[in-house]
Amino acid sequence: MDAVAEPPYRLTDPEALRAKADRLRARVIALSHTAGTPHLASALSCLDLLTTAYYSAMRFDPARTDDPARDRLIFSKGHAIPALYAVLHDIGVISDALLADYNRDGAVLAEQPAPFCAPGVEVATGSLGHGLPIGIGMALSGRIRGDDRRVFVLMSDGECNEGSVWEAAMFAPAQKLDRLCVLIDFNKWQATGRSREVMAIDPFVEKWRAFGWSAHEVDGHDPAAISAILENFPDGSGRPIAIVGHTVKGKGVSFMEDDNNWHYKVPDRDAFLRAWSELGQPEEEALALLEAAQPAGAH
């Protein structure tokens, strides 16, 4: 089987990855404002993990999106799907027109992802707790077929309340699925409160290690730390990898950071422009986006 080509969008410099993540955060905020969709802060917190995986580690050729040898990424925290839409748009998989129709009646790109709504969206993940089991199935089938594909699963910490996650977490090491990596957006919040108060999530990293994973604890907004692990994936241990990234919900925008109200709120025009400015993006571009789109209104 032919190897997947080196993608043209590859980034390795940590500062370039940080800048890319902030650029994508601005795009996600624009989507939330113009489409009137919530779950904004959850998308902002995971973007350094997602960007580092896509731009510095994954083998995914935009010109051959159905290549069976491609790496897969399961975006398990489906409510934050605009983060993945923004990445796929940036690398040229999702067109400007398709992104502009996000969450409109009859649009292909919905607030909760449908399977194959765009190349790179592998499954529907609006119902939490299923991404890891599906990713395990992909990793196991790849081994049976003799493929060298790797499977990445981006998860939320609140999602780890689900029993299906821990059944899967036991199965993967038993099957020695060393081409499987979970990236956990540990932003300390879920819909109704602090993750640690809703369920006894701690000791979180130690749980993954106890289940037999090669588990790592990093700053989830540090591309260099994330890349250092992904550069050695698989790591030779014969075990799947878990990267627990400590993140901040609403990362990058001062008035959204660590404020769980932005799990539900939609930015109005002033909030959008202020956030866009804080992320260092050109004001004229924000105004052009506003002119081109008719906001759906806040919830």
Image (tube, rainbow, N blue to C red):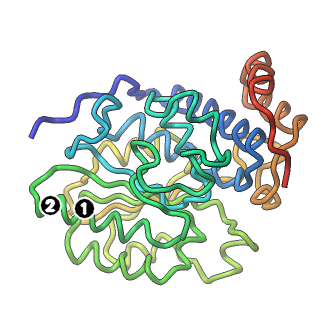
- Direction right: furthest residue: 270
Residue 240 lies left or right of residue 119; in this view the side is: left
Q: Amino acid at mark 2?
A: Arg
Disc 1 to disc 2: CB gap under 8 Å: yes
Q: Is residue 282 above or below residue 227?
A: above
> Which mark is drawn over residue 195?
none
Locate residue 30, reporting x and y percent. Answer: 72, 36
Quadrant hosting residue 19: top right
Q: Amino acid at mark 1?
A: Ala
Q: Nearer the viewer, residue 174 or 147?
A: 147
Residue carrying label 1: 139
Q: Nearer the viewer, residue 133 or 176?
A: 133
Q: Could you classify mark 2 by the number of other residues whose Cα lies within 10 Å: few (under 14), some (14-19), or many (20 or more)? A: some
Q: Could you classify mark 1 by the number of other residues whose Cα lies within 10 Å: few (under 14), some (14-19), or many (20 or more)? A: many
Q: Residue at x 36, y 71 (%)?
A: 133
- Direction top: furthest residue: 284
Quadrant hosting residue 287: top right
Locate residue 149, reporting x and y percent. Answer: 22, 50
Badge 1 element: helix
What is the total number of numbered labels drawn onto the structure image? 2
> Which mark is drawn over residue 143?
2
